[in-house]
Image (cartoon, rainbow, N blue to C red):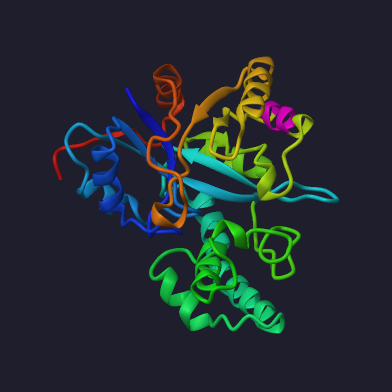
Amino acid sequence: MRIDLHTHSTASDGTDTPAELVRNAAAAGLDVVALTDHDGVGGHAEAIAALPAGLTLVTGAELSCRLPGPGGFSVHMLAYLFDPLEPDLARERDLVRDDRVPRARAMVTKLNELGVPVTWERVAQIAGDGAVGRPHVATAMVELGVVPSVSDAFTSEWLAGDGRAFVEKHELDPFDAIRLVKAAGGVTVLAHPLALKRGNCVSESAIAELASAGLDGIEVDHMDHDAPTRARLRGLAADLSLLTTGSSDYHGSRKTCSLGEFTTDPEIYGEITRRATGAFPVPGAGG
């Protein structure tokens, strides 16, 4: 089985519609794909309706979190197979999503002050019905020739966490995220924890604290982790009895990674589905 547990559609900041994403996943030879748009579940229904025979969909989301305390920074929590109607988790997702528009507007203002003629109208047009975020702002910057690629906008010069145009948004405490996802019957995996080029990395001590709070796993095989980093994380996961996943973090044409670039071991996938009680994987019926 080929299993990719981290992808994005136009419901957040990907370029494939949910229907296109599942069709492309099947064409890429995947057996299982997880749709994990940022802080929302708006793409699930379309993906399910279009799901090809032979492909199974894992419903999920990538939750925006911030480590607490002085010097805390943003981290991402992958949540799988939770009940999307559970009110407490749904409320927190809405708070994060509602803060995205004023945050993106503020980033546009900062860029304008730095001499970059990005407009909010263009950023909103790029985002469409998706959850507006930094990749949409970065795409507008690419169009203007300010940076050569979306990833080049995520630096201290521009949109990284310490960047000149960065603006914070409402984010969950990751310990609260674990509690809320668990209460909704879901499973939690810390996304790309040692992606150095994204900015701050999650310390091993913080990962251990999250594991003690009920974290199920960590994303190990990811395009932003080199081989030594993946080996380090695998050893840490073994020490902390955490599951290890692999995935593409696919965003369509917005990033260079391809569907199935990294995959999750079928036994790990089986354990994730065993632990989940809020929702169940959806087998394709040839939609």
Is 56 on the left or on the right of 141, as rendered?
left
Residue 16 is situated, as x and y percent measured from the top left of the image, at 33, 56
Q: Is residue 35 above or below residue 221?
A: below
| Closer to the camera in the image, 84 or 38 | 38
Q: The N terminus is located in which quarter?
A: top left
Report the residue that reaches farthest toward the left.
286
Q: Which x, y percent locates residue 120?
A: 53, 81
173 vs 121, nearest the viewer: 121
Q: Image point 48% across, 83% down: which residue?
A: 121
Residue 81 horizontal side relative to residue 197, left or right: left
Q: Quadrant of the C terminus?
A: top left
Residue drawn where x is 74% and y is 46% of the image: 200
Tell whether position 150 is magenta: no
* Number of numbered markers: 0
**Relative side of 71 to 161, left or right:** right
Percent position of residue 70, x then y: 86, 51
Whether residue 61 is situated above or below residue 94 in the rendered picture: above
Residue 103 position by quadrant:
bottom right
| Quarter of the figure with residue 203 | top right
Q: Which residues are magenta?
A: 207-212
* Residue depicted at 51% across the width and 28% down the height: 245
Magenta stretch containing residue 211, yes or no?
yes
Toward the right, the furthest residue is: 70
- Where is 258 relative to 238, above or below? below
Where residue 176 appears, as percent x and y from the top left, is 65, 44
User: Which SS type dominates the magenta stretch?
Assistant: helix
Horizontal side of 286 relative to 62 (left or right) equals: left
